């Protein structure tokens, strides 16, 4: 069945829904694997934890980047084992540590967290093999470090490793993640180069590393003005760096995390026109569950409204750009009109698009919003105003909608 027929069919059953496309996700995981040979991948669950999405991605050999205890448990329920789940987040509580220590590889985010892991491991009578998240002496664009709430400053970590007294903790890996949504292959390649130099330093300081997690950064085009990241070029650059590193450290595993790259393009948000009105010459379409069903388009309107700049910098994952989402209909042949798309909440902030050209729509017609596979359902305030929640549907590679 054609994609638009599936959407029309599901719109008979649901007034608003997400539709995730399993085939699309598999194409992306395949693209990563073929362009980055020798690399292991982790999926960042926080961008879309739908159980079928997790199963699909994990079935391709991906491990999990978990940002909370809840995500550690979700990854376990989806079938991953302890050594495939990497739990990296600032501010883990005692309970988070105690519960996750036997279910995931903990990535300590501060020196005091290493001590808390030491205490938990001692209580349990085990030696915990953990990673540490490093705040390195570089950024994507410069060769000096920045203050950060994430990770342990490189110098502090090295100092700790020289003088550590944690008999129940063994540090076997490092993790760095500095930035999301990078579209320049040469910038990412430069970052990977710096990462391998950093890994070299920690190989020595830790007496060998089992893994180096390069984090994420792999971006996707949201706006029509963005161009696709050159994956073959990036893959070739990484392969070259990796070959040099592997000649020194043949058994150290190298990992990359992806969230949005794997899923964003494979999700749409579909909602229905409930009403239309013209007020003092301006045409409005009132849609079901916009700000509360898919927050990011409304947030983009809000940022653009208050910003003095024509293209304000992104603040991921809340804001990417003012034109990050497409609005489509199934009525391609209808005459067009300028309309403002608003939602059914009792707030004037509930605007998703202001005065855009669309085919004329009537109550019952559907509006399809693109780029809704990541940071979409999970970021939306669905509890607000006791509204009925959008459904989350998964289109199986075999054609079934579940
Ligand atoms: C959110 C997150 C990611 C995923 O970022 P994307 O831009 O969606 O790929 C990767 N690593 C860490 C540590 C994260 O917090």
Image (cartoon, rainbow, N blue to C red):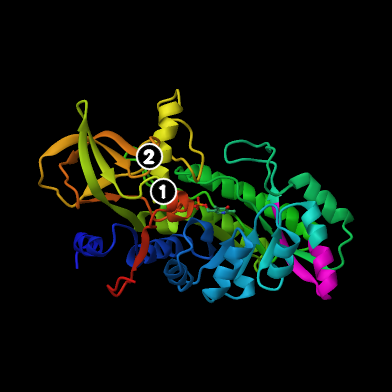
Quarter placement of the C terminus:
bottom left
Residue on which the image places disc 2: 350
Horizontal relation, residue 108 to residue 267: left or right = right
Residue 124 forms part of the magenta stretch: yes
N-terminal label among 2 and 1: 1
**Is 147 placed above or below 328 here?**
above
**Is 42 placed above or below 273 here?**
below
Q: Nearer the viewer, residue 44 or 273?
A: 273
Q: Magenta span covers which residues?
A: 117-133
Quarter placement of the N terminus:
bottom left
* Dot 2: element: loop
Residue 17 spot, x, y in % from top left:
33, 58
Q: Nearer the viewer, residue 199 or 260?
A: 260
Residue 8 spot, x, y in % from top left:
20, 60
Residue lying furthest top: 308
Residue on which the image places disc 1: 292
Residue 147 forms part of the magenta stretch: no
In the figure, residue 57 lies in which quadrant?
Answer: bottom left
Disc 2 + disc 1, Cβ < 8 Å: yes
Q: Residues within 10 Å of mark 1 (few under 14, many from 20)?
A: many
**Is 143 placed above or below 280 here?**
below
Real-space CA distance between mark 2 and mark 1, rounded to the nearest whole angstrom: 8 Å
Q: Nearer the viewer, residue 307 or 276?
A: 276
* Dot 1: element: loop
Which residue occupies 27% across, 72% down?
399
Q: How many marks?
A: 2
């Amino acid at each position: 069945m054609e994609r638009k027929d599936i959407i029309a069919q599901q719109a008979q059953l649901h007034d608003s829904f997400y539709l995730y496309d399993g085939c699309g996700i598999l194409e992306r995981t395949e693209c990563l694997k073929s362009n980055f040979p020798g690399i292991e991948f982790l999926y960042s669950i926080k961008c879309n934890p739908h159980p079928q999405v997790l199963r699909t991605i994990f079935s391709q050999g991906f491990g999990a980047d978990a940002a909370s205890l809840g995500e550690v448990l979700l990854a376990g329920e989806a079938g991953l084992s302890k050594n495939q789940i990497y739990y990296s987040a600032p501010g883990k509580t005692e309970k988070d540590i105690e519960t996750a220590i036997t279910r995931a590889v903990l990535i300590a985010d501060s020196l005091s967290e290493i001590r808390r892991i030491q205490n938990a491991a001692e209580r349990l009578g085990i030696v915990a093999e953990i990673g540490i998240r490093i705040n390195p002496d570089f950024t994507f664009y410069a060769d000096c470090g920045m203050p950060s709430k994430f990770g342990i400053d490189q110098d502090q970590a090295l100092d700790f490793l020289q003088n550590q007294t944690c008999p129940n903790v063994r540090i076997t890996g490092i993790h760095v993640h500095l930035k999301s949504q990078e579209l320049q292959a040469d910038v990412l390649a430069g970052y990977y180069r710096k990462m391998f130099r950093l890994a070299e330093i920690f190989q020595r300081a830790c007496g060998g590393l089992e893994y180096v997690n390069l984090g994420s950064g792999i971006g996707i085009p949201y706006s029509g003005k963005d161009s696709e990241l050159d994956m073959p070029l990036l893959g070739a650059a990484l392969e070259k760096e990796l070959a040099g590193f592997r000649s020194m450290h043949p058994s150290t595993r190298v990992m990359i995390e992806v969230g949005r790259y794997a899923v964003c393009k494979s999700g749409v948000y579909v909602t229905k026109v409930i009403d239309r009105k013209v007020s003092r010459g301006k045409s409005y379409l009132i849609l079901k569950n916009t700000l509360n069903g898919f927050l990011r388009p409304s947030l983009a309107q809000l940022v653009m409204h208050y910003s003095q700049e024509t293209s304000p910098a992104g603040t991921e994952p809340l804001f990417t750009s003012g034109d990050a989402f497409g609005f489509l209909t199934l009525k391609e042949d209808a005459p067009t009109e300028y309309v403002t798309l608003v939602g059914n909440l009792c707030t004037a902030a509930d605007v998703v698009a202001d005065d855009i050209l669309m085919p004329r729509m009537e109550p019952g017609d559907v509006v399809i919003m693109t780029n809704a596979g990541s940071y979409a359902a999970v970021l939306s305030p669905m509890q607000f105003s006791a509204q009925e929640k959008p459904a989350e549907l998964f289109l199986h590679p075999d054609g079934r909608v579940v």
